[in-house]
Image (spheres, helix red, strand yellow):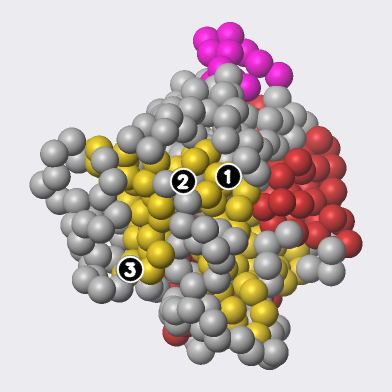
Amino acid sequence: MTTDSTASWAAAFRSAVLSPYESIELFERRSFAGRTLRQIIRLDGGGTVLRIRLTNRYGKQPLHIGGARLARRTEGSGIESGSDLTVRVDGAEQFTVPVGAELVTDPLDRAVAAGDELALDLWLPEDTGLSTYSAVPLRTGYAVPGNALAATTLDGADGLEELVTRHFIAGADVLAPTGTPVAVAFGDSWFEGTGTTPDTDHRFPDLLNDRLRAAGRDGWVVNQGLSANRLLTDEAGEHALARLERDALQVPGVTHVLIHFGLNDLGIPGQEAYPEPAPGPTAADLVAGLTTLADRIHAAGLTAVATTVGPYRDTIFEGYSTPEGVAVAREVNDWIRGADSPFDAYADFAAAVADPADPDRIDDTYDSGDGLHVNDAGAGALADSVDLATLKI
């Protein structure tokens, strides 16, 4: 394996994960037995050596991996012939991820670059139980019966299933020059990419990375967005204050944390109670939570960058938008923009995609169609709203 005393591990890909045992069931819950999963990851940064992070964080039984391989993806479920490498843990080709655990694989001696698409195959010979999963990866995955680790394509295979969720993968790290800056996009669906086109990498962090590369910057952004995630309340996923340490502060190489929270705190209570009203957080509640986030990010020696709460009035989700919630979002945004904000910088998401004639709603040009999430053009507007000088990467 290549080693370099001037290189350090840095996150090159991240995928925030959910428990399949939550009471809010927004996404399909899955288990697998006697199947091979082929799932695609696209690297946000490159390095000389690569390792994969596998997760059984929310599993209720050990996860047995009968074999795993990593290859360069071509198109569809295809991989480049001869490019596959055996993935091992502690030298073993078969291994088990304990209940509640995350495993880091042995390093793979392969140079990779930002934008590389890799296919990770997992042979799952035994029943996995309900899987720890990513809800909106916006990357088509594949599952087939039997051990298909040696297959250069799964297209046309008997029993082929396309997956819209991602399973058992938490991230990938690379050996990169020491000091390479990494920003973590830590937030909700506006970071994860709901509303953008699947399999095109048009999410906000992807497009921000395009800007960074075009500007010749050495660092990059990894995506820890989690759709329906909240700042103050669990589900979907652990609330932001609970998952901050694991999903942002402990990410290898992290130097900056971008945050977008508040929409779901304001909208989900009313959506769940509809047609009855439901109390939501006050502006003071959200300000206190955001201040705690900023303080903890600073205590870790990192730069904290806020984004204003995106507009959402007139969303199609009944009960989600209320006059009271919209007013709170305005108040929180004024605080983020003001002198009392504890953040080092902010990007004005709300202004970037708002209807100029009605700033509480998403402009039609940027609306994905549900009045709550932006489309590809909207994600581009969000990326353009970030002052690259504030990232210093």
Q: Which quadrant of the figure contains the N terminus?
A: bottom right
Label for residue 65?
Answer: 2
Label for residue 271?
Answer: none
Q: Are marks 2 and 1 in contact (CB under 8 Å)?
A: yes
What distance separates the C-alpha of mark 3 from that of mark 2?
Answer: 17 Å
Label 3 sits on what residue type?
Asp
Q: Earlier in the sequence, mark 3 or mark 1?
A: 3
Relative depth, front residue between 298 and 368: 298
Mark 1 is surrounded, within 10 Å at the Cα level, by few (under 14), some (14 to 19) or many (20 or more) other residues, namely many
Q: Earlier in the sequence, mark 2 or mark 1?
A: 2
Label for residue 97?
Answer: 1
Residue 14 visible in the shown view: no
In the rendered image, residue 85, in percent from the top left (x then y), is placed at 38, 69
In the rendered image, residue 174, in percent from the top left (x then y), is placed at 56, 74
The vertical placement of 387 against 185, above or below, is: below
The vertical placement of 274 against 88, above or below, is: above
